[in-house]
Image: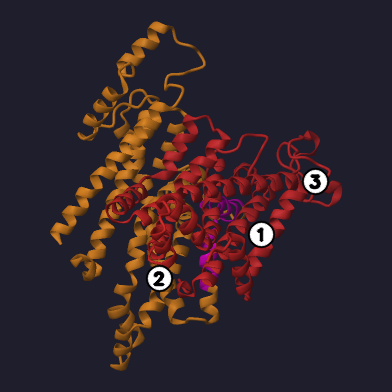
Amino acid sequence: MLRFALLRILSAIPTLFLVVVLAFLMVHAAPGGPFDQERVLPPENARNLAAAYHLDEPLPRQFGRYVSRLVRGDLGPSYYYRDHSVSDLIGAALPKSLQLGLLSMALALLVGISAGTTAALKRDTLLDRFVTGFSMTGISVPVFVIAPLLVLVFAVQLRWLPASWSGSAGLDRLLLPVLALSLPQIAYVTRLVRASMIEVLSSDFIRTARAQGLSTMSIIRYHALKPAMLPVVSYLGPATAAVLTGAVVVEIVFGVPGLGQLFVRGALNRDYTLVLGIVIFYAILIILLNLLVDLLYGFLDPRIREA
Amino acid sequence: MKSSPAAVAGEALRLASGGGVRVPAAILLLLVAAALLGPLLSPHDYFTMDLSGRLQPPALEGARLFGTDDLGRDLFVRSMSGARVTLLVAVVASLVSLVIGVTYGALAGYAGGRIDAFMMRMVDALYALPFMFLVILLMVAFERNFLLIFVAIGAINWLDMARIVRGQTLALKQREFVSAAELIGVTPAAIVFRHVVPNLLGVVVVYMTLTIPQAILVESFLSFLGLGVQEPQTSLGALVNDGIAQMERAPWMLLIPATILALVLMSFNFLGDGLRDVLDPRLRER
């Protein structure tokens, strides 16, 4: 198990390096600099500014400088928010995004696993049709359609919940964003669990358990749930990526000052160090989660550990 | 035994006697027809502003079927031409991902061994990239070039296609007609592109119906952020974005394009699912 874990961690390093190189090149190949403004700076000032941020050096030198700071956890200064470092900006925005993301994933797993299992047990009944139809719809409707619709219904028409983050200081400001972010994930998890639960429930060891007279509840709890969770576990990696992307939309629609909003604003302001820092941060997050998924997989299914 | 993609698609459609494929296919055909013909039938166009007729709710009067937007432009024509742009971007992007994915997957599968292992490790590594964010970076850096949207979206979506095609190629490689071609000295490149790829087209066509909605999502996401198509041109995602700004005064500006977008995505997903079931009954219930 330890060997397996170490191998996986080592193989994540080249991936991370690839992300850094790609993102760095993309940012630096972009026409237009971070200090381009309406007012053209005198050449003297422009040169000083470039020198202060080492923008006058050849690209490989800049890259080396960036990477050597990166391994020490320093993402450099922000070009746009002059007095802040990128790490500070990410640190300030992260808690809000983390709150949204974790709550949404927890909700998605809770509702998705229960709904999927129920649908699998009541296969081909009206309830099953309803759950399947709902999940197909949920998969097809993007977050940026769901989010404004939720605002329209619950904030504008019914006036039950605040329409934006700044409209309230309590927990109610979390409700709509979390719901918008988790609905597509609920749909996806439901679909996955229903399919794998149907497969597991038709396997021999479940029939044996039934023959021994175990109740449906304890069969699900002690025998079926663990193997049926495998597809859900492997979906956690892509789900993280989807939630991060969805969070961009949700944070913009609801005005949450989180990472997604920071990223889009950084991109529009051509704040290249900030954008680069966030992309690398996201990549590390996704790679770490994939790693965790692999380890969890090995834990859930011993056959994979051996291979 | 070669089969043209059209024949495979036709066969698939014929086999799907249930409503699983017919209903979404019919909805899609209707939407495509409306997107192509709608703007021609309406007396309005998508860019003319009418400042005296802003934010009119949908009405038959004056042929404002979907009402007007905050600049007095006709929302019916804008929705239809937006759908046209969205579909066009999606189809072209899917073709790009198809060309890359099929070539890559077929080469890896046919080469086999170490080359295959290395090429597939690359695909695994690319899966971990936060693609959406790299695309946003690309769009901002290169000034929202319309052509670039196609390429960028296509560049995201080829990974799944490559995996599927590789798997199929591995199976096809064992078949007699490939051995026969090798025996009479056909070059590897010719075997891959003349003999292996045409036999993959059935699977590829089905998976394309599933990559199109993904491409639509990316395009509308970018347009939603204001990084997609440029005014006065529009797409469904851009219309949804406009609608959000006006949703308190003119909810139809949000509801209509959002419904059309959801309908398009749902139809493609159902169609792809249905076609996959027809092609491979073993995958049903997944």
Task: Tell whether B200 sits left or right of B123.
Answer: right
> Could you tell me which residue is drawn at 54 percent across and 72 percent down?
B278
- Give the residue at the far front of this rendering: B184
Q: Residue flagged by tag 3: what amino acid is it?
A: Leu
- The boundaries of the magenta stretch are A131-156
Q: Quadrant of residue A65?
A: top left
Q: Give the image location of residue B117, x and y in percent.
A: 29, 54
Residue at numbered disc 2:
A193
In the rendered structure, which amino acid carries the disc numbered 1? Answer: Leu
Q: State which quarter of the image contains the C terminus of chain B.
A: bottom left
Nearest the viewer among A301 and B185 is B185
Kindly indicate which chain is depicted in red in the rendered structure: B
Q: Alpha-carbon neighbours of circle 2 within 10 Å: few (<14), some, or many (≥20)?
A: many
Using the image, tell me which numbered label, if any, was put on residue B28: 1
- Tell me the SS state at disc 1: helix
**For this rendering, which residue is in front, A84 or B65?**
B65
Residue type beneath disc 2: Val
Discs 2 and 1 share one subunit: no
Please state the horizontal and vertical placement of residue A24, each as a whole percent of the image: 34, 32
Tags 3 and 1 on a common chain: yes
Question: Residue reaching furthest left?
Answer: A2
